[in-house]
Amino acid sequence: MTETTMLPTAVLRPFRDHPYYVRNDEEMDALADSIREHGVLSPLIVRPLEDAPGEYEVVSGHRRLFAAKLAGLHEVPAMIRELDRDAAAILLVDSNLHRDHVLPSEKAFALKMKMDALSHQGSRREGEKWSVARLSEDANISERKVHRYIRLTHLARELLELVDEGRIALTPASELSFLTEREQADLVNAIAYTDATPSVSQALQMKRLSQEGRLTAAETMRILSELKPNQYEQLRLRRDDLKRYFPAYCTDEQMKRDILRGLELLQRKRNRDQGR
């Protein structure tokens, strides 16, 4: 069993290229308050740095370390594990992947990090190869979704931010990741100009044109300017404005049907009048 030891915060380094954000928000303030009162209850997991004797890389506990520093602590409890880079990366991803509020970009780069680590291990250890099936099982998402998340790592930063904000869904975002850097830059400009984001069908259209070498900035602007089915302007009528034309027992669906019938009759009368 690995023993817990107290380590100075000054010798602890964040895991290189780790995919999770450490946010200085209300949750972090609450964690810092808890640490001030009770200390760090769950030890960090760290590994010795090969190129920096006496220093350690944090594998699990980046948020706890940040909160401990906010709370004014100069040392924290930690378990030192002799892990190579790949084993540490897998542990880091697995210890964070199921926590609340993981952004799509965090999940994307986490899955990519674990995929690379498993691939490296598979090349060294006979019979242990990375597979999408294992990632799917560990992350409790479909294999198709694993592929889509990993595709996000090919998106431009500006587009990835829109995914994190919920303005671009996972499926169209994964299709847009096949665009070239220039085409993605054109798309970023088109989104800023039109204040619209691509639907799945629009993303697929852009991907097809890109593969054919025909996706110009003008084409991107044209596609993005097309109205989506849910963007057509709706004409809204207040019930109070209509109730004098209908019995009180009429439902909204009955009122809609009668209004459309009345409009059909009006259109027929206009056609007759035009023909005279």
Image: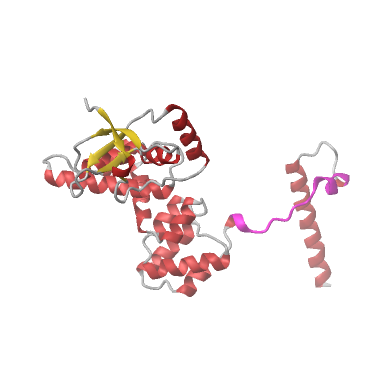
Position of residue 187 relative to residue 136, above or below, is below
- Write the residue at 26% across / 41% down: 90
Position of residue 128 relative to residue 170, above or below, is above
In the image, 47 versus 174, the foreground residue is 47
Q: Give the range drawn in magenta.
A: 230-244
- Write the residue at 73% across / 56% down: 235
In the picture as drawn, the residue positioned furthest to the top comes out as 1
Q: Mark yes or no: residue 133 visible.
A: no
Q: In the displayed structure, does residue 6 sit left or right of residue 191?
A: left
Q: In which quadrant is the C terminus drawn?
A: bottom right
Residue 199 included in the magenta stretch of the image: no
Q: In the displayed structure, does residue 139 sit left or right of residue 200?
A: left
Which x, y percent locates residue 201?
47, 58
Q: Looking at the image, how many numbered discs can be counted on the residues?
A: 0
Which x, y percent locates residue 26?
53, 40
- Write the residue at 41% across / 47% down: 21
Residue 231 included in the magenta stretch of the image: yes
Quarter of the image where one finds residue 99? top left
Q: In which quadrant is the N terminus drawn?
A: top left
